[in-house]
Amino acid sequence: MSVTQNITNQSFFSADDKPQEECGVFGIYVNDEDINAVAEVYSGLYSLQHRGQNSAGICVNDNGTFKCCKNKGLISEAFRENALEELPNGKIAIGHVRHSLQKFEDDDFASVQPLLMRYVYGSLAIAHNGDITNKAELHKQLAEGGAIFQSNSNAELISYVIASMRLQTDTIDDAVIKAVDMLEGAYSLVITSPSKLIAVRDMHGFRPLCIGKMKNSYMISSESCSFDSLGAEFIRDVAPGEIIVIDKDGLHSYTNYCGKPTAMCIFEQIYVSRPDSVLDGQNVHNFRMNVGKVLAEKYPVDADVVCGVPDSGSSCAVGYSRYSGIPYGIAIIKNKYIGRTLSMDNDGMRKRILDIKINVLKSTVEGKRVIIIDDSIVRGGTMAHIVELLRKAGAKEIHVRVASPPFRNICYYGISLPQKEHFIANQLTPDELCRNIGADSLEFITVDELLSCAVDSQINFCTACFSGDYPTEKPTEFYDKFSVKIEV
Ligand code: SF4
């Protein structure tokens, strides 16, 4: 019997054995004749594809006339040949890539972003990353006032809130400022009104958002790696609580909600963001290298080679190797191009997909004592599978090191995780888990050790899924009852 079959948990092999990133947003305000807004957003979204693969969309604003192109699938699938050529060459454009753990149903198309709405002050398009924690209360309030919702998306709710505030204010800037006062939870937004590009980051700064510039044109992106890809200059992060408005007069900053305690999702550093991004001062690759160093320092073991589970585990393994002097090796080869087109209706199929997805380089591990570092363990199935493959490839000893503490709590701020009873750390002790995945040793970094790795960060972190220390009120019970489908 294989080691993986020893675990009785029926959901051991699962599509969500990794936390799922939620969304990426991008926007541009063009001030240069030779810059094409749609082309830049399209390229910007490619650099954010890792943040969401279920749908993609672009909305362009040509002097107040808005047109969207969006569809399900990867960017290459969502924008079919010539599709973007049908979009006008407007001055402002926004884009979105989305992840959803839900199977994509036809009626989910209403949730594909950017969302475009029309109201008495013209059009408004919005793209959102995060999760609103007072969604149920706002939804109820607006629905009882006559709002009719097409979807259960946060973006639709936020646009209703802004539109209703616009009826009470003189400018869209004031409407957004008032709306932010009503929204709780995680939101990094790009919005276009008829004449402005607006960026908003919630006061905790849960999700990243930054400003770039190409010639005289401004860009907003979830991650700074976009600006490198486009040849644009990184200007700065949008501060937690800050509202940025870009119009014909330039860039304006509203800081009414800045200066509150911050809580960026630490999982952005561990797993979600690209290693070449810098989030609030902290380079992601350097953070992961520091994690590897701490794992080597606190949880040493004699070994012949240290390897990472790509992608995020690789930076950690380099850091471990440099600190310990144990040679770094590439052992795990991942096939990224599978998953969405295959049905995963049973454990046999899920395991089959893992076989297709992960392979081991025998020459790296045969006859050796191997340290393997992964970013996280959620249900345990993937790591058990990797250990089994390493054994089959001839590894003499296998020591697992994990770059995040054990998951114990769900996330309310935009990362899809399974229900907490499915976390393997809530079912087994570390020793039991080590035995069940078939490893010779298993160690997790602690929350304090993890926080010590963000040496360059200008922001504090949320660690709630590990520590249970939530930076906001949890959504009320009413939230669960009211929502037909809950986006977690
Ligand atoms: S609960 Fe975990 S995944 Fe969610 S924002 Fe906090 S650190 Fe990130």
Image (cartoon, grey):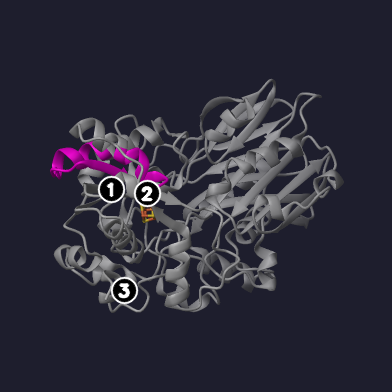
Camera-side mark, 1 or 3: 1
Q: Position of residue 385 (x, y in %)?
A: 34, 63
| 186 vs 369, nearest the viewer | 369
Q: Label 2: few (<14), some or many (≥20) within 10 Å?
A: some
- Determine which residue is flagged by label 2: 361
Residue 418 vertical placement versus 249 (above, below): below
Residue toward you, 297 or 147: 297
Quadrant housing the N terminus = bottom left
**In the rendering, at what x and y percent does residue 13 appear?**
39, 70
Distance, label 1 to label 2, CA atoms, is 7 Å
Evaluate if marks 1 and 2 touch, with contact meaning CB atoms under 8 Å apart.
Answer: yes
Q: Is residue 265 left or right of residue 187?
A: left
Kindly identify which residue carries mark 1. Answer: 365
Q: Is residue 314 magenta?
A: yes
Residue 203 left/right relative to 452: right
Eyeballing the image, is 39 above or below 477?
above
User: In the picture shown, does residue 370 fall above or below 225?
Assistant: below
Instruction: Provide the secondary structure element on which disc 3 rests.
Output: helix
- Identified by mark 2, the residue type is Leu
Q: Quadrant of residue 435?
A: bottom left
Q: Is label 3's Cβ within 8 Å of ligand 1?
A: no
Q: Which residue corresponds to mark 3?
A: 421
Residue sitting at x 52%, y 50%: 187
Residue 413 lies within the magenta run: no
Residue type indicated by callout 3: Glu
Q: Which residues are magenta?
A: 292-317
Which quadrant of the figure has residue 474?
Answer: bottom left
